[in-house]
Amino acid sequence: MSAVILLGHGSPDPRAGIGAAALAGRVADLLPDDEIRLAFLDNTSPTLTEAALTVASHSDITVVPVFLSRAYHVKVDVPAEVAKASAAINREITITEPIGPDPLLIDVLDHQLPPGAPVVLATAGTSDLEAQAAFEALAQEWSQRRGTHVLVAYASQAQPDVATAISRLESVGEHKAAIARFLLFDGVFPDRIKADAQGRAITTVLGDAPLLADIIADRVLATR
């Protein structure tokens, strides 16, 4: 039997853990021959090593980074934790591509927003320039498909923030901006972005979207 460990950031907000557990359940439905586990980098248990030890006897172990960008966590923290876990169980662990920023997720957000409205693509935030460039490319692709302005904004670590992005979009058009929350689970940043939206149209977080489990299953199958 194979094992798949979904490795997320972790959050002190219990809603994030509930969302992650629900996502793991949907992935299990898509990969019935695999044992699905959760692990986290911070704030939440278990660690990746702890999770790996529970499935050490399985024929192979695959880690899926449940992150929406290729920022510091994916580049540095995830490989480091996988190396620790591999050493603890004395065998190799496979790492898949992260789940984002996958353009397929834009469709999930677009269907929730009013047509014609300019969009703030609101992310948690990163200081990683490569990750910022990937978000900008995603926004440009969405803008072309949607036929409206799409502007990236950050809840932390980078500019513009959500309030500034809203102001910029509404200063050049007649429509109120709509807010697309490019985040996985409910918590501090989604709440902050919702507060900044001030009643404007806003999407749910991505963790509940059935497509997200499909993307994770595809990441796993691509390694086999």
Image: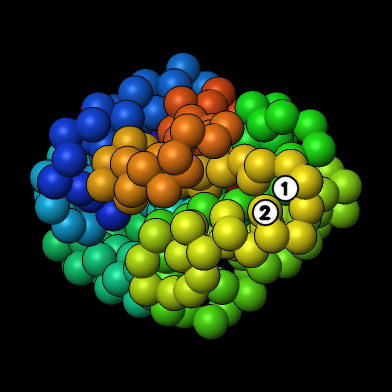
**Residue type at tag 2:** Glu
**How far across and down, in percent of the image, does residue 42 sit?**
17, 57
SS state under label 2: helix
Specify the farthest residue to the bottom: 129
| Few, some or many residues within 10 Å of mark 1 (<14, 14–19, 20+) | many
Left or right of 141, for residue 159? left
Q: Taking 116 as reference, is 81 above or below it?
A: below
User: Which of pointers 2 and 1 indicates the residue nearer the eye?
Assistant: 2
| Few, some or many residues within 10 Å of mark 2 (<14, 14–19, 20+) | some
Q: Which residue is mark 1?
A: 118
Q: Quadrant of residue 56?
A: top left
Q: Nearer the viewer, residue 111 or 97?
A: 111
**Residue type at tag 1:** Pro
Left or right of 97, for residue 83? left
Q: Taking 133 as reference, is 58 above or below it?
A: above
Image point (67%, 54%), residue name: 170
Q: Is residue 6 visible?
A: no
Q: How is the image coloured?
A: rainbow
Precedes in sequence: disc 2 or disc 1: 1
- Numbered mark located on residue 170 in the image: 2
Quadrant position of the N terminus in the picture: top left
Mark 2–mark 1 CB contact (< 8 Å): yes
SS state under label 1: loop
Q: Nearer the viewer, residue 114 or 223?
A: 114
Image point (36%, 38%), residue name: 185
Left or right of 53, for residue 209? right
Image point (76%, 60%), residue name: 172
User: How far apart in space, not on screen, are marks 2 and 1 (Cα)?
Assistant: 8 Å
**How far across and down, in percent of the image, does residue 211 sit?**
60, 29
Image point (44%, 21%), residue name: 26
Q: Is residue 173 visible?
A: yes
